Amino acid sequence: MKTERLVVKIGSSLLTRKDGTLDITQMSAFVDQIAELHREGVEVILVSSGAVAAGKTELKNRPKLDTVSARQLYSAVGQAKLINRYYDLFHQHGILCGQVLTTKEDFATRRHYLNQQNCIRTMLDNSVLPIVNENDTTSVNELMFTDNDELSGLVAAMMNCKRLIILSNIDGIYNGNPKNSDARVIREIDVRKDNIEDFIQTSKSETGRGGMQTKYNMARKVAEEGIEVIIANGRKTNILPDILNDKQELVYTRFIPSKEDLSSVKKWIAHSDGFSKGKVVVNAGAKEALTGNRAVSLLPVGIIAVEGRFEVDDIISIVDEDGSMIGIGRTTYNSDEVNEVIGKNNKRPIVHYDYLYIEQ
Ligand code: GLU
């Protein structure tokens, strides 16, 4: 087994029974597998859902609540229950685990991002296994992760992991409706070549927030950043050690990581499109330069318009004249300053190459 750092994401549907209660047998099986990896020297970061589902069944006389309050109440109770279970189960293997609760906003500013990265790194350096979940008690609707698949991609990128394993209740991405007997799991996806958009099923699991569409979107992006993504069935016995031991006959979907391993700053930028404060529109020449093979920065001379109000160091989107997204980056000018230098030569870059991410 290769020693490496990886993220394992386990969805709510794998951690709960039909009646919604936490499936301790299943949790215990996952912990046994992760403990085996841990003993072999693999650094595992666990992203675990299940808080909302676990809390819901604890509250016997469920009050009538709006969706936000319900999620807050259930996750407050459920997360405590979930982490306690994990703590005890890992403890039986002599492994110490710790809880990291996060929100989308913690990924928005570089300072919070680095702080969070430092926390998880310190845990790993001290052999404490991080268990990450969204802080559903404080996150508000418009600033929530789409689901824990998105969160696991962000964590894998932030922690420079080589691999992200998403455990679901399905064998992988199928080339048709998984209910049809002739549908097969697509074993390997090269995001630069293969377009499998039409195969993605839009149905969602009943317990979790995510579905195959968000898994696919996230997996594409993460693989483009040089991280291998695997979508596999968590109900298969011993799935995690089998994946790490490259067991041949095992069926799952693997996204081939692109050769290019992005710098950690670029990985952060790549996932920041949701935090964009404004937009700059670039001309055809600038578009060609930015999307070409050379490492170029975004210069004022290529800009034709500015939209929105932003400050220095904010994340901004870069679009072409038709409004199509080209990339995102961290700006070194505020929006007023950009307005003053539009189209001008010999000015410093608006977004330096090191802080620029161009969409594929
Ligand atoms: N954070 C949610 C929970 O723990 C899960 C979100 C998701 O389903 O992806 O319940």
Image: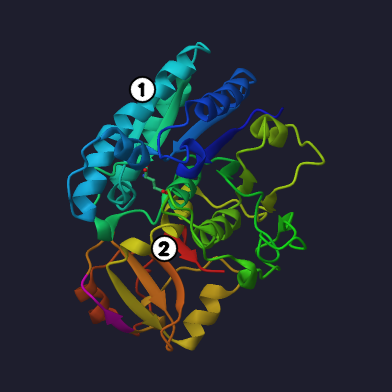
Specify whether 54 is left or right of 59.
Answer: right
In the rendered image, residue 307 lying in the magenta stretch gets the answer yes
Secondary structure found at label 1? helix
**Image quadrant in which you'd find residue 301:** bottom left
Q: Residues in magenta? A: 305-309
Disc 1 marks which residue?
A: 84
Q: How crowded is mark 1: few (under 14 residues within 10 Å), some or many (20 or more)?
A: few
Q: How crowded is mark 2: few (under 14 residues within 10 Å), some or many (20 or more)?
A: some
Looking at the picture, which amino acid does disc 1 mark?
A: Asn
Question: Residue 170 at x, y = what percent?
Answer: 62, 49
Residue at 43% x, 24% y is 86
Vertical relation: 269 (above or below) 11: below
**Image quadrant in which you'd find residue 338:** bottom left
Question: Does the closest atom of ligand 1 sit within 8 Å of the Cβ of label 2?
Answer: no
Specify whether 356 is left or right of 107.
Answer: right
Residue 352, which numbered label?
2
State yes or no: discs 2 and 1 in contact (Cβ < 8 Å).
no
Mark 2 → mark 1, Cα distance in angstroms: 45 Å
Specify whether 66 is left or right of 75.
Answer: left
Closest to the camera, between mark 2 and mark 1, is: 1
